[in-house]
Image (spheres, grey):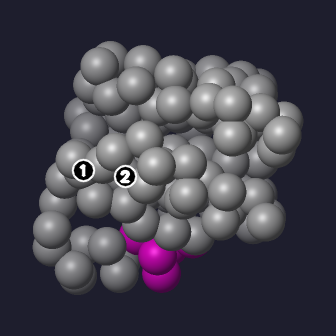
Amino acid sequence: MKLMIVDDSSIIRNRIARISRHVDLAKLEIDIVGQASNGKEAVDLFVKAHPDIVTMDLTMPEMDGVECTKALAYMNPAVRILVISALSDKSTALKALKNGASGFLYKPFNDEQLISALESLVN
């Protein structure tokens, strides 16, 4: 499984990458194929990297996560997108799910929560 990480925070991107290399996820053979800091970069990278799974922040410059989710799901309806956001607004979460997201995880999250959410997307 190929994973692309999308978040405007390099700290969050690096944390997701570190957790994604966790021993429990190794058995799922998840390989990180790229990282993007905004939705526009994510769309460009998606075309090149063809990830199976995407972690997506909602609040980003240039193109937000809701619009980016919609664009990625349009390009590949089979992609599994896990929205990871600090927004506690249920309507925004529902909009992302309606636009093609497969799951939602609130920030702050711990390692186990992210591992569980990624395992859910893969299985």
Dot label at residue 85: none
Seen at 65% across and 65% down, the residue is: 120
Name the image quarter holding the C terminus.
Answer: bottom right
> Does the magenta run of residues contain 5?
no
Type of amino acid at the residue the image marks with label 2: Ile
Q: CA distance from mark 2 to mark 1?
A: 6 Å
Seen at 31% across and 73% down, the residue is: 93
Please give the residue where the numbered disc 1 appears in the rendered image.
107
Q: Exactly how many numbered labels are in the figure?
A: 2
Q: Position of residue 110 (x, y in %)?
A: 34, 45
Please give the residue where the numbered disc 2 appears in the rendered image.
84
Whether tag 2 and tag 1 are in contact, CB under 8 A, the answer is: yes
> 97 left or right of 78?
left
Q: Nearer the viewer, residue 85 or 100?
A: 85
Label 1 packing within 10 angstroms: few (<14), some (14-19), many (20+): few
Label 2 packing within 10 angstroms: few (<14), some (14-19), many (20+): many
> 89 left or right of 114?
left
Tag 2 secondary structure: strand
In the rendered image, the vertical position of residue 110 relative to residue 121, given as above or below: above
The kind of secondary structure the magenta stretch mainly shows is helix
Q: Is residue 68 visible?
A: no
Seen at 71% across and 23% down, the residue is: 33
Tag 1 secondary structure: loop
Magenta span: 96-100
